[in-house]
Image (cartoon, rainbow, N blue to C red):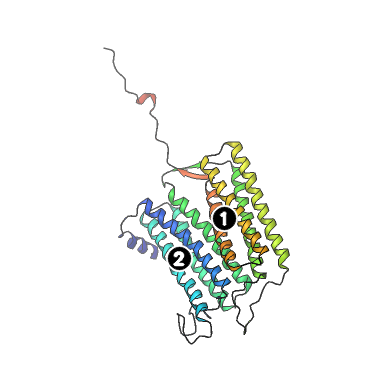
Amino acid sequence: MLYRGFVNLVNRLPMPSLAVQKWIAVAVIVTQGGIAVTGSVVRVTASGLGCTTWPQCHPGSFVPTGTSTAPWFHQAVEFGNRLLTFLVVATAAAAVIAVTRAARRREVLVYAWLMPLSTVAQAVIGGITVLTGLLWWTVAIHMVVSMAMVWVSVILFHKIDQPDDGVDTVVLPKQLRWLTALSGVALAGTLVAGTMVTGAGPHAGDKSPDRTVERLDLDITNLVHLHAELLVAYLALLVGLGFALYAIGARQSVKLRLQVVVALVVAQACVGLVQFWTDVPAVLVTIHVALAGACTAATAALYAAGRVREPAPAPTASPTDTPTHSAA
């Protein structure tokens, strides 16, 4: 009943073109990845508790106040990150409205609805992170969910870009699609290990002398090696996939996506090494998070390319449909 009323309301809006739908989907990808980057800025500037509670910034106030004990800079950084959530919600809502108005196929609607629903879940996780005093594992979950949302938003873009009346086309053999999916699993493991490195690292998100942020009590060097080895496994799977794609003569578009993923992973590895050698400078942490989002988006795009929906071929005329001409 409520959904039908929503559809009736949306149907009063102008019909969005395919280009508009795609641009909205791009905005969803950018905002989902962008809020992870701004979240890293919150952490490396020790502004994680610039707002001391949630959903309010401070007890009795939704905005920073001069009466708070937190430095004004930390309040502004944390509050700015919270404000970006409204942009994430706006783009997610726009995606739902656009595909609903365009009466897109069911799978497009499902992926579109996942965006606002997961954004609400992410807001709750962020609230728990603040209320528990930035426990390392809550920050880790916050980051992993952000990357998962980047993955889903890329899949949403590809679903929107494919025709509703098209036919499913297998671009890659099932074995290579499984290999692509396995590379995504390796990426997930690498991301989780990365959050553990962060949990044991120097950037806790808060440096107030009157409170101590609980950290992951494991040797950080061992965690770094685990993280690096998982990255090597991820890259090895991609290299193996690359040889297979060239062996079967895969489409140039698929090979290009693989090349982009490999380039991003190599760049990410280089940033990680420099971080380790230079005692984790703040600016490299933010770059590392941005590249993590880029690697996630590129891997999702590669995975999506294995099976696509293409326009149905035009019907061919049968011999009986050919006009005949009588002899003169």
Q: Residue 21 occupies which quadrant of the picture?
A: bottom left
Q: Residue furthest top?
A: 328
Q: Point out residue 320 in the picture as x, y percentages from the top left corner.
A: 36, 24
**Most foreground residue, 16 or 174:** 16
Q: Residue 13 occupies which quadrant of the picture?
A: bottom left
Name which residue lies at 66% across and 49% down: 236
Quarter of the image where the C terminus is located: top left
Name which residue lies at 36% across and 63% down: 6
Quarter of the image where the N terminus is located: bottom left
Question: The residue tagged with tag 2: helix, strand or loop?
Answer: helix
Name which residue lies at 71% across and 67% down: 220
Closer to the camera: disc 2 or disc 1?
A: 1
Q: CA distance from mark 2 to mark 1?
A: 20 Å
**Most foreground residue, 279 or 307:** 279
| Amino acid at circle 1 | Cys
Q: Point out residue 61 in the picture as x, y percentages from the top left corner.
A: 45, 83
Mark 2, residue position: 88
Left or right: 245 in relation to 12: right
Mark 1, residue position: 295
